[in-house]
Amino acid sequence: MKITAIESLQWAEYPRLMVVRVHTDSGIIGLGETVDKIPGSKGALHGTIAPLILGQDALDIEGLWRFVMDNIMYHGYAGAETRALSALEVALWDILGKHYNAPLYHLLGGKTRERIPTYNTCIGFGDVQDYQWWHTDAGALAQSLLNDGVRAMKIWPFDPYSESSFGQYISLADVEKGLTPVRQIRDAVGDAMEIGIECHFRWNRASMERIARALEPYNILFLEDVLPAVYPDEIKTLSSRTTIPIIGSELLMTRWQLRDWLTKGVSQIVMTDPVWNGGIAETRKIANMAEAFGVPIVLHNVAGPICHAVCMHLGAHLPNLYYVESVRAFYKTYFPVISEFAPTVNDGHLSIPDGPGLGITLRPEMLERADLTREISDGEGLAKGRRAMGDHWAVEEIR
């Protein structure tokens, strides 16, 4: 089954998303997706990856991934190229599932659970302004989420206080301000709601220790990305000095960047994103590696309905799953616009999609919208077969 075209779709209304469609000579089209910093990912997809992939067998996912990785690793890989490769790899799994008429979780080896535990990241979009809500009355937001079946939520109340010192110092007064929404949640709903704190790697360890000490009385579920991931030793030291589990890090791409993190025992929980880290198979490899260290995994999921579906299938399969992140403001607003996939939460859990592949399709009208930017790479491609690391193939074939 040859790959005949690679197509990227982006809509002005959803500028953070890039949807990828991989076309084959059998007529099967696979869907993939990545999120954020789209200009670089789009350039990598069409300029670097498409010439390698066009004309290749769409069912050889592992071989194609290795071939692309060997080439992009030649000049450094863990940025736009890996995000683009992730979107492409997701689409190849979707093709595989459609070809064999099997859902993704069956292709991975089946389910270990029937429903997926989730926490809500309190972002705002459209009519669902959860971000504004937790800044004004986090207790009321917590009650609204509980009414929707959500039992865990994530907020980032200390971020604004990092700006004046570049994260080098937080005053006691600012710590108290940051605690305000946490207190509101506990006052409103008690311990019925789990609370995760996102830190967006804005602080040094001294400041994070002060923040963590202040949060400990509130039964916090986790602290996420407490320092930049380039400081694993500092993060490990912080982990040993607080009773709150630490999660890290969505910023680490592929199993190779997670390897030393796990070997060092940096954090009690790891997080990875299947539309950033290299894709579906790479996520499973990372999770399996973490399982060998007795470490649970969180799936980072702040993209669109395609990424969400991927995370549901992976969440169903992975035995060491801790949580899958989800965003109510996304799945209640634009997910049903882009696709027919409209997730719901029941008792803190999400359901698993049915149908072949990812179990998700784009609405046809998305391909006709006036705000659509579409780019297609097609033809035979430049790489005849698969060769070793480096980009020498391009020079040889162009001659």
Image (cartoon, grey):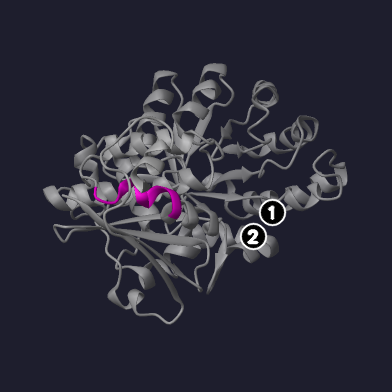
The vertical placement of 65 against 23, above or below, is: above
Amino acid under disc 1 = Pro
Where 234 sits versus 73, above or below? above
Horizontal and vertical percent for residue 69?
Answer: 41, 36
| Magenta span contains residue 331 | no
Q: Earlier in the sequence, mark 2 or mark 1?
A: 2
Find the distance from the CA under tag 2 to the CA under tag 1: 7 Å
- Label for residue 234? none
Q: Main secondary structure of the magenta part?
A: helix
Q: Is any part of residue 300 visible from this angle?
A: no
**Outermost residue toward the bottom?**
370
Whether residue 156 is visible here, answered yes or no, is: yes
Residue for point 57% across, 17% down: 264
Q: Position of residue 389 (x, y in %)?
A: 40, 30
Crowd rating for badge 2 (residues with CA inside 10 Å; few <14, some 14–19, many 20+): many
Residue 44 horizontal/vertical position (percent): 47, 51
Q: Is residue 183 left or right of residue 161?
A: left
> Which residue was labeled with disc 1?
181
Q: Are marks 2 and 1 in contact (CB under 8 Å)?
A: yes
Indicate the secondary structure of the residue bearing disc 1. helix
Quarter of the view holding residue 388: top left
Q: What residue sits 72% from the left and 43% below the top? A: 202
- Residue 68 horizontal side relative to residue 199, left or right: left
What residue is at 40 percent from the left and 46 percent from the top? 86
The numbered dot on residue 134 is 2
Which stretch is magenta?
A: 47-55
> x, y (%) of residue 29?
23, 59
Foreground of the two, 47 or 270? 47
Tag 2's secondary structure? helix
Q: Quadrant of residue 243?
A: top right
Q: Amino acid at mark 2?
A: Trp
Q: Is residue 309 left or right of residue 267?
A: left
